[in-house]
Image: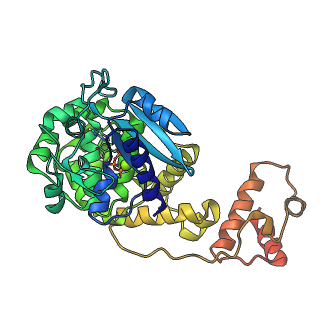
């Protein structure tokens, strides 16, 4: 495992220079429950400038938070200096960063007990918050007093439910009650961060349970623009896996669509996708024609969205189209205008679309003589 071996090299370098260093966070958690690991977080007693001096290639990613990214063999590894929680006056950034010499203090500032387990280079575990116990009981539990921790950083509420979705765990009772009490604070969090967590949440294998937590805690109502999703409380979210569909659903009955599209950090592609899917829910388009116009990737999304709205499970079937592009039409614009002796105008585009529609829907064969007959009758 190259990632792990690279991580161990970083621990070793730090240890040999006389500093404490441990794997921590999601990687330790996921390894303990036999899930694959994607990235490595390291926590160390070495200050950022020391970390930067010990490795050849580093990036000062979040120096203000004590984070340096060490790059070895092109693999980025986040190394963060032990620090304590110092409160977030604006709900986003800690007021100041206070480093500490104690691993335990560093683990105390972390969000959930299962994310607060450290592992040293010899695989010895440090677990002062009893995260192992919660990991065995499949419980997601705050480190410390939930309302306090969620008030410091309200994003933790969504992170928690995202972990529930990914891991299939339950929310510990006090943690659940804590979210219920302070859920409106989520409105202080940026849409970038919210979007990222929701995307993770809807892709988790326990997304149905996670969605219920969003409803039960009233977190969903408090999320900007997403309250319309409350309408789907009794729906089966197993049928919905693609992140953008959550945002399409929220948009279905919005009057100010353009405000919504510019308020969230949607890519150009996502904006277009939301607009197309939304309008095709309102005026349904047959699957073959949708696939012809917008391609297979969006067709799969459209299929999933329709299945979700009708609450039916139906596998997506690849459609063999008799026509892939306009270029393949057995007739061209010059011929059309010769047959229909009218000045050029929007009617040409409309006619072309009509011909394409009929061919794709197999009501017309893409053959020159057939199309000429069809056009003659068009006028
Ligand atoms: P994943 O990478 O699977 O999303 P993760 O637990 O590794 O999960 P990261 O965002 O990579 O999550 O953060 C690494 C660790 O940093 C967490 O496990 C946790 O200990 C700590 N952490 C991250 N964000 C917060 C936060 N908002 N509040 C407190 N601790 C946090
Ligand atoms: Mg991580």
Give percent across and percent down for residue 108: 19, 38
Quadrant (top left, top right, bottom left, bottom right) of the C terminus = bottom right
The residue lying at 73 percent from left, 65 percent from top is 325
Q: Residue at x 37, y 62 (%)?
A: 240
Q: Position of residue 184 (x, y in %)?
A: 22, 33
Numbered marks: total: 0
User: Visible in this render: residue 217?
Assistant: yes
Q: Residue at x 48, y 37 (%)?
A: 54
Q: Nearer the viewer, residue 241 or 64?
A: 64
Is 155 in front, or is 13? 13
The reply to whether residue 260 is in sight is no
Decide: is 12 above or below 376.
above
Q: How is the image coloured?
A: rainbow
- Indicate the position of residue 218 as horizontal and vertical percent values: 19, 43
Up the image or down, 371 lies above or below 168; here it is below
User: Which of these two is toward me, 364 or 290?
Assistant: 290
> With 326 as the anchor, is 320 left or right in this view?
left
The image quadrant where one finds ligand 1 is top left
Q: Quadrant of residue 86?
A: top left
State the image quarter where residue 294 is shown.
bottom right
- Residue 97 relative to residue 358: left or right: left
Check the picture and name the quadrant holding the N terminus.
Answer: bottom left
Residue at image point 52% right, 37% down: 58
**Vertical placement of residue 143 versus 184, above or below:** below
Residue 343 x, y percent position in the rendering:
86, 49
Q: Quadrant of residue 337?
A: bottom right
């Amino acid at each position: 495992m190259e990632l792990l071996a690279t991580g161990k090299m970083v621990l070793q370098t730090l240890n040999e220079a006389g500093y404490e260093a441990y794997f921590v966070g999601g990687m330790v958690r996921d390894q303990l429950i036999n899930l694959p690991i994607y990235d490595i977080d390291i926590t160390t007693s070495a200050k950022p400038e020391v970390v930067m001096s010990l490795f050849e290639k580093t990036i000062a990613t979040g120096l203000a938070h004590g984070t340096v990214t060490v790059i070895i063999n092109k693999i980025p590894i986040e190394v963060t200096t032990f620090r304590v929680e110092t409160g977030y006056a604006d709900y986003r950034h800690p007021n100041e960063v206070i480093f500490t010499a104690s691993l335990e203090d560093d683990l105390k500032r972390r969000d959930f007990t299962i994310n607060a387990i450290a592992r040293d280079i010899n695989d010895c575990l440090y677990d002062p918050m009893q995260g192992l116990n919660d990991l065995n009981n499949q419980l997601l539990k705050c480190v410390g007093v939930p309302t306090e921790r969620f008030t410091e950083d309200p994003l933790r509420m969504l992170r928690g439910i995202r972990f529930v979705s990914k891991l299939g765990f339950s929310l510990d009772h006090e943690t659940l009650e804590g979210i219920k009490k302070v859920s409106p604070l989520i409105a202080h969090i940026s849409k970038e961060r919210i979007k990222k967590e929701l995307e993770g949440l809807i892709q988790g294998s326990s997304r149905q349970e996670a969605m219920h937590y969003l409803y039960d805690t009233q977190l969903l109502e408090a999320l900007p623009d997403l309250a319309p999703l409350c309408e789907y409380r009794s729906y089966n979210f197993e049928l919905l896996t693609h992140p953008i569909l959550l945002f399409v659903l929220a948009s279905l009955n919005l009057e100010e669509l353009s405000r919504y599209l510019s308020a969230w950090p949607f890519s150009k592609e996502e904006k277009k996708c939301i607009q197309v899917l939304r309008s095709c829910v309102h005026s349904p388009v047959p699957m073959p024609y949708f696939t012809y116009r917008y391609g297979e990737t969006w067709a799969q999304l459209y299929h999933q969205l329709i299945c979700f709205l009708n609450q039916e499970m139906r596998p997506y079937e690849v459609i063999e189209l008799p026509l892939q592009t306009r270029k393949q039409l057995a007739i061209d614009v010059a011929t059309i205008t010769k047959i229909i002796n009218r000045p050029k105008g929007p009617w040409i585009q409309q006619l072309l679309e009509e011909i394409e529609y009929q061919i794709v829907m197999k009501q017309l064969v893409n053959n020159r003589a057939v199309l000429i007959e069809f056009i003659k009758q068009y006028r």
